[in-house]
Amino acid sequence: ADEPKSLPDYAAWKDRNALIVHSANTMETHRGAIGTGVITPSEKLFVRNNLPAPPASVTEDPDAWEVRIEGVNKPATLTLAELKTLRVTTVASVLQCSGNGRAFFAHGAGGTQWSVGAAGCVMWTGVPLKDVVEALGGPVDGARYITSTGGEALPDGLDPKTLVVERSIPVKAMDSALLAWAMNDTPLTLTHGGPLRMVVPGYYGVNNVKYVKTVALTENQTEAKIQASGYRIRDVGVKGAPDQPSMWEMNVKSWVTAPLKSGQSGRNMIYGVAFGGTVSLEKIEVSTDGGKSWSPARFLGPDLGPYAWRPFVMAVDLVDGEYRIVSRATDVKGNTQPENRTENERGYGHNGWSDHGVTVTIS
Ligand code: MSS
């Protein structure tokens, strides 16, 4: 077996025992470390970097960080200190990688083999993007996308478009997007995109551009590879292309977090987390017979809004035996998790309830 990997320097402050370290750029939360809280402690939150992070020095004087705003009537470069003079907002939202659940695909989807832990629910604090755009005279005519660029240094000699983390999202996301400088009430760490990050509640992780250095309202989507052909849903064996669905809004999803392997006969508490992506949940159900019969579970803790997840619990009496425990969430629009995954080349957007279950022995 491989030696257990240690945490990379830029994430050394993380709780090593809570994480599966896939690589220096990819760490996921153990299913058993997700817990029953509404907010994921920062030390346990997953990390995913497509490129090496910028040097730690960028977070030494966060207020000096500059972001260029384009595609507005009065384009400007603003410091984080200036952004802080505008309106402040806080939102709880699920941050989830597009490939969370990739490990369950059977065709060998390329990329990090995330199980359930490339997701967490955190509090973001910053300025609503809407307010920034309004302060700069509003969007230019014909703006259809919000295009954000990450602040990583790119190696010389390579076409920047093949590497840059630059993502476009529909302009309607302006209603909820924010430029965030704090996570879980602490200045945003380099690990999670400090000093400043584009946060798009309800959208997959990749759209939440870290160390954001430019935000532009654009007529078209960026031609950067990560947008044009990356993070696109297509059939197995098919190459990515701009006409395929982009990993934007998240779908309804849930999974069990305890018990994971064994339990004692008698009363058992089954825990998990569930979220609707861009809308609130209607209900969460749990099955202990692999989905043949379902019972309602109960949400735990406060409802922090449509973008947050809801921990849940179901109390059940179990006799000795083996149980396949699965959960199934339904959102307020009536979308219910499907039983099976939608096969796709890169293993994106898996919300099928069957694969996400656990097999538990009660004795
Ligand atoms: N940003 C930048 N700048 N860079 C990179 O790399 N990545 C992505 C996002 N953003 C990046 C960015 C991804 S892809 C994800 S998931 C996220 O981020 C994560 O986060 P954290 O904080 O956890 O690390 Mo998939 O869809």
Image (tube, helix red, strand yellow):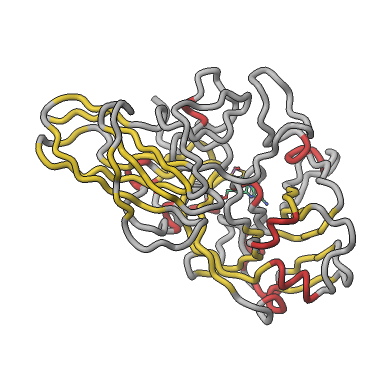
Residue 17 visible, this orientation? no
Q: Position of residue 62 (x, y in %)?
A: 64, 71
- Between 264 and 291, the one nearer to me in the picture: 291
- Between 341 and 206, the one nearer to me in the picture: 341
> Residue at point 12% right, 36% down?
264
From the viewer's perspective, tell me whether residue 64 is left or right of residue 158.
left
Quick check: 31 above or below 86?
above
Q: Position of residue 179 (x, y in %)?
A: 66, 65
- Residue 85: name its quadrant: bottom right
Q: Position of residue 290 (x, y in %)?
A: 31, 26
Q: Position of residue 301 (x, y in %)?
A: 33, 61
The residue sitting at the bottom extreme is 85
The quadrant in which the N terminus is found is: top left
> Residue at point 53% right, 48% down?
277
> Residue at point 82% right, 58% down?
217
> Residue at point 61% right, 49% down?
203
The quadrant in which the C terminus is found is: top left
